[in-house]
Image: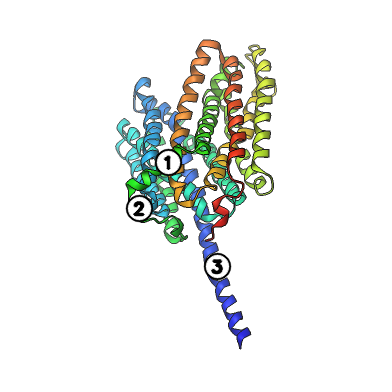
């Protein structure tokens, strides 16, 4: 009789775990889809600038403001998001972010106006701050070990880069090459809206336990967690590492097409195509690291990545500097540096999601939202700073020297990774909690 009761109990527990596992898979799928959706929009700024100039007759100087609408809204809102996010709930935050973007996207094909583009990128920036903070905090709820956390983080960030690549093809599919002034490209936003609605539907039917982050404190008390985090040495190192990583990533990524034109003397179209290899490397590197992190120590992987990046710079830049103009250049006759430099993205890729994962998984889950909000803000500042400084170096010293000097922030980033490895606890709170 007792054996029958125990057997029935085991069957009941197994039946209860199956729906939870399926729901967790739905949430993970939605995180990936949501991130890919925002990747398309966030990295469409260059395409939209080009299109509003040619189809809405906006002056180039005015069109350039779209980048600021995106980046500044991300940096500013990230500080405020964490204060109310645990009370709102991460699933609701994800759904709200998607809903805001869907509404703002509808304004583009409806009004055919430049103000709609400003509104869209401001809303995308605000929503991404909301969604990214909720995503990183949700990963902490869906995983039970540091390596599992790092693996899922790399997969989600890897799919972000896949979204970046897919976005180029998606927008290109709606641009009419026969009529550069056609407004048909605005119809791409109906696809974006459809994707948002699908993600909202997936989240609506999924469930996951958020009890670990529910607090009775008010938003102001939660907001005060941010200064307390900034006073901790490991967190200061983490935020500096985040800043330096995005400094390098955006410094190289934003100026790689210009490097290809000015230093490698490639045609403009070929320069952009060659730069897309950099984004592909970021995607492959993050997805590959997602599997590797389950088996190999994170610091060993990232230390190797820093060394290999530096080696590529040391080898490729002198090769690039000696390139001569070839009006008949093709992919078969392109300079070797054209293929070496973008590979930096492959080794740069795992660093950002891994350090985010390692630090967040060492904190109590109730602090994940505050830490993620600060991380997003420092990343936004690092990206803007890296692009600006690299641009000035291009103007003053030339592209080869500008890329060579990227060894400096790389070395500082390597030092930060070593300090994080020494200062962070080996067994994070995440592993001691159960769902």
Q: Residue at x 46, y 61 (%)?
A: 207
Q: Residue at x 45, y 48 (%)?
A: 367
Mark 2 lies on residue: 217
Secondary element under disc 2, as helix, strand or loop, is loop
Q: CA distance from mark 2 to mark 3?
A: 31 Å
Numbered label attached to residue 17: 3
Label 3, residues with CA under 10 Å away: few <14, some 14-19, many ≥20? few
Q: CA distance from mark 2 to mark 1?
A: 16 Å
Tell me, yes or no, if residue 121 can be seen here.
Answer: yes
254 left or right of 181 in image: right
Numbered label attached to residue 269: none
Secondary element under disc 3, as helix, strand or loop, is helix
Residues at circles 2 and 1 in contact by the CB criterion of under 8 Å: no
Q: Residue at x 32, y 30 (%)?
A: 114
Among numbered discs 2 and 3, the one appearing first in the sequence: 3
The picture quadrant where one finds residue 419 is top right
Q: Position of residue 101 (x, y in %)?
A: 37, 44
Is 224 above or below relative to 70? below
Is 53 above or below relative to 41? above
Label 1, residues with CA under 10 Å away: few <14, some 14-19, many ≥20? few
Mark 1 lies on residue: 228
Q: Residue at x 52, y 61 (%)?
A: 435
Q: Nearer the viewer, residue 231 or 47?
A: 231
């Amino acid at each position: 009789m007792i054996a029958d009761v125990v057997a029935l109990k085991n069957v009941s527990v197994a039946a209860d775990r199956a729906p939870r596992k399926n729901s967790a898979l739905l949430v993970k799928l939605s995180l990936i889809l949501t991130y890919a959706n925002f990747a398309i929009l966030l990295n469409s700024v260059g395409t939209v600038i080009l299109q509003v100039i040619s189809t809405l007759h906006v002056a180039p100087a005015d069109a350039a403001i779209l980048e600021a609408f995106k980046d500044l809204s991300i940096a500013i809102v990230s500080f405020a998001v964490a204060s109310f996010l645990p009370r709102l709930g991460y699933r609701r935050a994800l759904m709200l972010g998607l809903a805001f973007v869907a509404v703002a996207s509808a304004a583009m094909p409806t009004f055919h106006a430049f103000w709609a583009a400003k509104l869209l990128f401001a809303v995308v920036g605000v929503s991404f701050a909301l969604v990214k903070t909720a995503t990183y905090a949700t990963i902490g709820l869906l995983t039970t070990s540091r390596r599992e956390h790092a693996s899922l983080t790399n997969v989600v960030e890897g799919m972000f880069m896949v979204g970046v690549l897919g976005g180029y093809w998606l927008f290109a599919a709606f641009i009419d090459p026969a009529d550069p002034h056609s407004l048909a490209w605005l119809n791409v936003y109906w696809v974006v809206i459809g994707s948002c609605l699908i993600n909202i539907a997936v989240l609506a039917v999924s469930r996951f336990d958020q009890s670990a982050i529910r607090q009775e404190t008010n938003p102001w008390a939660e907001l005060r967690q941010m200064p307390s985090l900034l006073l901790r040495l490991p967190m200061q190192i983490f935020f500096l590492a985040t800043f330096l990583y995005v400094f390098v990533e955006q410094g190289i990524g934003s100026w790689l097409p210009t490097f290809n034109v000015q230093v490698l003397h490639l045609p403009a179209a070929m320069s952009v195509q060659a730069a897309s290899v950099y984004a592909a490397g970021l995607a492959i590197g993050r997805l590959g690291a997602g599997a590797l992190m389950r088996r190999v120590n994170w610091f060993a992987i990232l230390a190797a990545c820093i060394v290999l990046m530096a080696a590529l710079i040391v080898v490729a830049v002198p090769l690039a500097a000696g390139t001569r103009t070839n009006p008949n250049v093709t992919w078969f006759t392109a300079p070797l540096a054209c293929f070496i430099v973008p590979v930096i993205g492959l080794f740069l890729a795992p660093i950002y999601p891994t350090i985010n994962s390692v630090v967040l998984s060492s904190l109590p889950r109730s602090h994940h939202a505050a830490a993620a909000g600060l991380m997003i803000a420092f990343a936004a500042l690092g990206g803007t700073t890296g692009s600006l400084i690299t641009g000035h170096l291009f103007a003053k010293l030339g592209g080869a020297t500008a890329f060579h000097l990227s060894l400096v922030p790389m070395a500082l980033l390597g030092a930060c990774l070593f300090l994080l490895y020494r200062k962070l606890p080996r067994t994070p709170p995440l592993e001691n909690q159960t769902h």
